Amino acid sequence: MKKIRQITALVLALSVSVGLMAQRKLTEATISYDIVINTSNSSPQAADLLDGATSVIYLKGTSSRSEMISSLGTQATIIDGKERRDYSIERLWGAEIHDHDDTGQLETIQ
């Protein structure tokens, strides 16, 4: 009986400490990854155009920036958490598109 109590206390202590570490707040980070498309089809498909693309996401406080570079072109989105606005710049197939939105509208949709 004493051994069961010790094991139960150990499991409880470990679960509480793991739960506390899992709730740490992320305030700044850089996430990057390479996009790889594998298909069994010998002829190129639309998704194959993204093969070899790279994506990077920067997080700091309430703001973020994401960038994707592929054979189609580049795309960047900046979210300004303080001003509650987002900006998007796309350079695809030689065309450049600029866009911005008020992210406050997202709260009314959700």
Image (cartoon, rainbow, N blue to C red):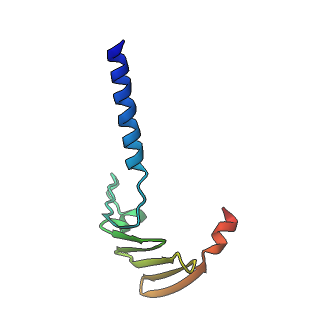
Residue 61: x and y in percent read 45, 71
**Front one among 81 and 16:** 16
Determine whether, in the image, residue 81 is placed left or right of residue 28.
right
Residue 4: x and y in percent read 36, 17
Residue 29: x and y in percent read 35, 67
Above or below for 30 versus 19:
below
Determine whether, in the image, residue 105 is placed left or right of residue 5.
right
| Farthest-out residue, right | 108
Q: Residue at x 41, y 46 (%)?
A: 20
| Farthest-out residue, front | 2
**Front one among 80 and 14:** 14
Q: Residue at x 49, y 71 (%)?
A: 62
**Front one among 50 and 22:** 22
Q: Residue at x 39, y 36 (%)?
A: 15
Quadrant for the C terminus in the image: bottom right
**Front one among 50 and 58:** 58
Above or below for 35 versus 90:
above
Quadrant for the N terminus in the image: top left
Q: How many numbered marks have been drawn onto this rendered protein structure?
A: 0
